Image (cartoon, grey):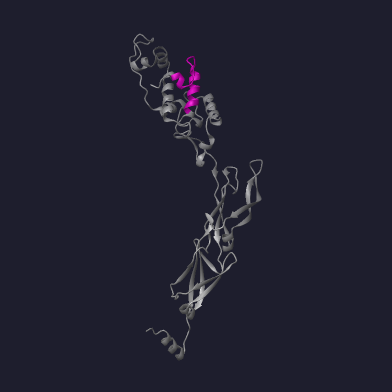
Amino acid sequence: MVGDYYKTLDINRNATDADIKKAYRRLALKFHPSSNRETGSTETFCQLGEAYDVLSDPRKKATYDKFGEDGLAGGIPPEFGSSGAWCSKYVYHGKPEKTFRDFFGGDNPFAGERNGPYDEGAYSNAVLVILTKEYSFPDFFTNDTPLQFGGFQAGVVKTQGPHIERDLHLSLDDLFHGCSKHIKISHRVMNEDGHTSGIKDKILAINVKPGWKEGTRIIFPKEGDQGPNCIPGDIVFILRQTSHSLFVRQHNDLIYKAHITLQMALVGFSVDVQTLDGRLISIPVNDVVHPSYHKVVTGEGMPLSQDPDRRGNLIITFDIQFPKKLSAERKYLIKHALTFK
């Protein structure tokens, strides 16, 4: 039992059969578990089904009006009714979907069927419910899915068109300092008549932050081509970094290759590097430079996009230029110079 059936259907005890049908139609659609995340409720939907099952049946309704819930639960007294005794106890079958389906004459009340209690007027009222504020349309149309009630669809929502992806080529200097880019696009837009379309140019502004990396995606929602039956897709720019003459980027680090002689590798030297912000820094190298050696200069790499005040490292690698040939005299001198005692 759900308590007061009239209160459940939001009607008074003088309600006519048409009032009962109208109330159930409105509330069953509103509180169907599949109709809306905010209003949909399995418990409420079941209570509505039970209330309608009782009040739509003249004998059950008369018993409930005279004896209340106890009369239904205990069975109709023998002296009640003109057709003799009926001692069956009333228990709702617990299948509100069946009540819903029987009321609308099928699985889909919007299919235009007119059989059963779902007549032409009921069809019109059901459609009007969908068009009123009974439902939260942003929630209804989430994820571009068809509008659904249980096992049927009330209509198909417009789907979003395909996304358009374009490469945005930027230099290492642009990504080091940050920059602004203005890009002209041409996309199809619908005319005011809603049926024809034309091509229109538009300027999109992209503010590149210092430290952005290869593959960063800049999304302009719904700036793609429009159509009469679709939502415009997004325009997505994918950052592509062009090569640099001095540096190779590795995440937030910059790699610089210095070309040195074998003599420099053995006795020490200094490397002068022109940085991306215009400074000339001199890095002393006092170690013996072997083929796998590299020098790390902290804080001279790319700015971090999350914190531009911090920077990655400058990593110096070395290309040691060995002599192609040596005279006998030079071989002798090198041999003695490298003889350790």
Q: Is residue 56 visible?
A: no
Where, quadrant-wise, is the C terminus in this rendering? bottom left
> Does the magenta-highlighted stretch encompass residue 12?
yes
Count of numbered circles in the view: 0
Instruction: Kindly indicate the quadrant of the structure image that contains residue 228.
Output: top right
Percent of width and height locating residue 132: 56, 30
Q: Main secondary structure of the magenta part?
A: helix
> What residue is rendered at 60% in x and 54% in y?
207
> What residue is rendered at 42% in x and 30% in y?
42
- Say left or right for 177 vs 117: right
Percent of width and height locating residue 293: 44, 72
Look at the picture and state if 21 lies above or below 329.
Answer: above
Look at the picture and state if 137 lies above or below 323.
Answer: above
Foreground of the two, 177 or 217: 177
Foreground of the two, 19 or 120: 19
- Say left or right for 38 vs 280: left
Where, quadrant-wise, is the N terminus in this rendering? top left
Percent of width and height locating residue 332: 43, 89
Q: Residue furthest bottom?
A: 329
Q: Is residue 137 visible?
A: yes
- Say left or right for 194 vs 268: right
> Does the magenta-highlighted stretch encompass residue 20?
yes
Percent of width and height locating residue 64: 40, 15
Magenta range: 5-28
Look at the picture and state if 60 lies above or below 205.
Answer: above
